[in-house]
Amino acid sequence: MTQNIRFQSEGDGLLADDILHGADEIARFLGITRRSVYYHAELDQLPVFRLGNQLKARKSTLVQHIAQLEGRHVAEGVASTSGL
């Protein structure tokens, strides 16, 4: 499942709509606490980046990251039950 982001002329708003600004917005989007955002970011478990001193993340990248984690979890579950 690939999600394409179109880059268009300035003022279009497409890229800006995909960016979450700050730990609070990221936390709200993911349904976790602000502190959890910082914790997982520090451990490189969340695909975030910094501009200056503010954390930022793309919604589309977070959704892809979660899908990959889900896929890995499903694959591990299948592997662990295949020996039954």
Image (spheres, helix red, strand yellow):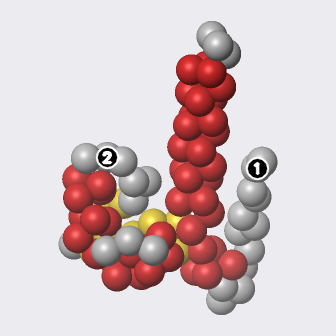
Residue at 43% in and 54% down: 47
For label 1, the crowd category at 10 Å Cα-Cα, with few meaning under 14, some 14 to 19 and many 20 or more, is few
Q: Which of marks 2 and 1 is nearer the N terminus?
A: 1
**Does residue 42 appear in the picture of this structure?**
yes
On screen, residue 40 versus residue 13, left or right, reads left
Residue at 74% in and 74% down: 8
Residue at 72% in and 64% down: 5
Q: In this view, does 27 lie above or below 71?
A: below
For label 2, the crowd category at 10 Å Cα-Cα, with few meaning under 14, some 14 to 19 and many 20 or more, is few
Q: Residue furthest bottom?
A: 11
Amino acid carrying mark 2 in the image: Asp
Residue at 28% in and 65% down: 36
Q: Which of 31 and 12 is in front in this view?
A: 31
Q: What kind of element bears circle 1?
A: loop
Q: In which quarter of the image is residue 22?
A: bottom left
Residue of label 1: 2
Q: What kind of element bears circle 2?
A: loop
Q: How far apart are marks 2 and 1 (CA)?
A: 22 Å
Residue 23 drawn at (x, y percent): 32, 75
Residue 29 drawn at (x, y percent): 50, 76
| Mark number, residue 44 | 2
Q: Residue furthest front?
A: 84
Q: Is residue 56 above or below residue 78?
A: below
